[in-house]
Amino acid sequence: ASMRETRTKKTKTVCTFCGVGCSFDVWTKGRKILKIEPSEDAPVNSISTCVKGKFGWDFVNSRERLTKPLIRKGDAFVEASWEEALDLVAEKLSGIQSTYGPDALGFIASSKMSNEENYLIQKLSRQVFGTNNVDNCSRYCQSPASWGLQQTGGIGGDTGTIQDIAGAGLVILIGCAPAEGHPVLATRIKRAHKLHDQKLITVDLRRHEMADRSDLFIRPKQGTDYVWLAAVTKYLIDEGWHDPLFISERVNYYDEFVKALEPFTLEMAEQTTGIAKSTLIKIAEMIHEADGTAICWGMGVTQNIAGSHTSAAIGNLLLATGNMGRKNAGGFPLRGHNNVQGASDMGTMPNIFPGYQPVADDVVRGRFEAAYGREIPSQPGLDNIEMLAAIEYGKLRGMYICGEDMAWVDANSNHTQEMLAKLDFLVVQEIFMTTTAQFADVILPGVPSLEKDGTFTNTERRVQRFYQALPTLGDAKPDWEILMAVAKKMGYDWGYTHPSEIFAEMASLTPWFAQCDYDVLEGWGSFHWGSLDGSNTPVLYADGFNFPDKKARFALHDYVPPVEFPQEFDLTLDNGRLLEQFHEGNLTSKSAGIQHKLPEVFVEISPELAKERGVESGSLVRLESPYGSVKVKALVTDRVDGKTVYLPMHSHSHENAVNLLTGNAVDVKTHTPAYKQTKVRLEVLRKD
Ligand code: SF4
């Protein structure tokens, strides 16, 4: 064994952080991670990586890793054997199932787990427990973007590849900050902008790095993107700058759409969004002049009550100008987590099976019922927002949460914590003792990607393999093995010996993956899903949109104005990421180098507001929303302006975490929390 431990080994892996999907070799010796080595063979990033992919791996060997199953005894957790822990999980979950029915259980999947593991979570929920109550964290971020693209093109994924963003004549970034959130993708845009005369428009409340580099930077009022998008589309059509041939051949509902756009004049848009008429015209001109427009968007669009409708408005604009279904153009929601696309693709949502096949469709359901050997409810289950509500009403009694820190990342996290505390039984499958895990009755220790085999799917629908680089730690097990063990205790012997068999089963039930398997994905190989014949499809819709008549659809939806707050909450709270940390920092905060660079969060305050309130950089302030309050140091910066303040989401402190402030409003179509529609008031606690 000692010989083996001292051998230096090189293993190909895929980054565990953002949705760009960088891959690289990791050099290891025993459990030691020696270095990350990028490779020209990496299809997305070649030799580029960012600070997280390169230096963010200390968490894997953190002393805080969970290495043994834990069972709650009163207020404490005691270590248990796998046998004991799994027996208890099976006994309690089946007890709830038989007393209250299958729909008294809810399952939460993880965008950090592999595709194979996500597939098994939905299988566990549907086959073993008989409920469609299964969801994943795309509900918190990108569900509205997927919805908007499904409404217009028919598929809820990026319409092309990162290469198509780089190749577009114009890139429009709306409510996303890729230099911070998707760094390697941002370098592609920076290069195209510098070397190939690509034009760049940034639309955001905060003047982040990409905004500084843009040809045009605009700050609409919070929650009004729908209006300027509709007005610019109307203006393009009025000027005859749309693509009539593309529309007549490939898109339905044009006349209805033109009628629906009537109210969105430039004057109305200027009034509602605060963007000058001349600027709106400038945007339209830039789209008209560009050879291919790519629109990238993020949480600034989706985490609003109009997130779905706004995403559909982006789809409409792209269709009106013939910018979908072709190279070097299209719609690109920038997925946050490395496998948030994959988690949804694998059917961990209450209304769909893998490949977005509707649960309510009898033919589809029949196929899964035949494969799973049991009846599956025809009604969609509860999403994670509905699950919390069902706990409140005593309808949901047990939950199984995989790698998702709901108690921390949910909007209005105080409320989520109250709900989790009410459950009869909570299983948490995790690698760390997260805030959510502290509410568990049983904690099952999983492993990070470096300790198992599997596949991840990045933001451009690209599936890539990662390989086991390290031995598993302590008694922790690969998550697919844990899920399989739970199923077995419940009488379902799945019998997989390797994730490739899980992938093959999924592909056999999911037309989009028909021509994909572990051989195709071997090494640096990759595969983009998106065609019904199951072939590799980097650009969607070249042969037709994903509707029965192969035509796209202009989506007709109303503008939903922003949430109203009592007047005393006079400041707009924006929130998001900074470069070094990832999300709530569960992983990155365990890297000493990263933690050193960004040890604590601060609230960004504009020079105008600072002057008005007597705040200086370093002053301690209290921010208060109708839902809670935080204490945080101020940073005076012109990245924000006027009455907008920006609080990064990376805090892990009960003093200053942003979700103590965010509220209960949700997107009208998908229930994504309106994290970006929060108002606060500010009190200065200490100046200095
Ligand atoms: Fe990882 Fe994203 Fe950075 Fe690439 S850009 S190394 S995927 S965090």
Image (cartoon, grey):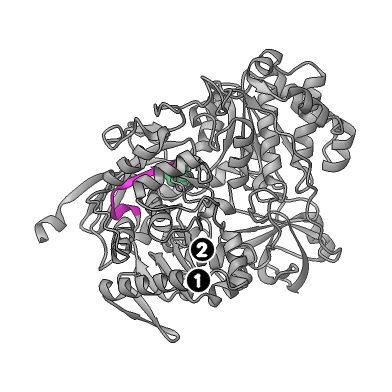
Is residue 619 inside the magenta stretch? no
Along the viewing direction, whichever of 127 and 1 lies nearer the viewer: 127
Is residue 450 inside the magenta stretch? yes
Kindly identify the residue that appears in the image at 32 percent across and 43 percent down.
505
Q: Is residue 81 above or below residue 13?
A: below
Give the quarter of the image for residue 533: top left
In the image, what residue type sits under mark 2?
Asp
Q: Residues within 10 Å of mark 1 (few under 14, many from 20)?
A: some
**In the picture, which quadrant includes the C terminus?**
bottom right
The span shown in magenta is 449-458
- Residue furthest top in the image: 245
Query: Residue 595's x, y, as percent?
Result: 47, 61
Kindly identify the residue that appears in the image at 69 percent across and 47 percent down.
206
* Residue 64 visible within the image: no
Give the quarter of the image for residue 511: top left
Query: Residue 404's x, y, as percent?
Result: 48, 61
Secondary structure state at the residue bearing disc 2: helix
Q: Do the residues labelled 2 and 1 touch (CB within 8 Å)?
A: yes
**In the picture, which quadrant includes the N terminus?**
bottom left
Which residue position holds label 2? 103
Say whether mark 1 is within 8 Å of ligand 1. Answer: no
| Cα distance in 3D space between marks 2 and 1 | 8 Å
Which residue position holds label 1? 100
Query: Residue 406's x, y, as percent?
Result: 53, 64
Secondary structure state at the residue bearing disc 1: helix
User: Residue 373 shows which numbered tag?
Assistant: none
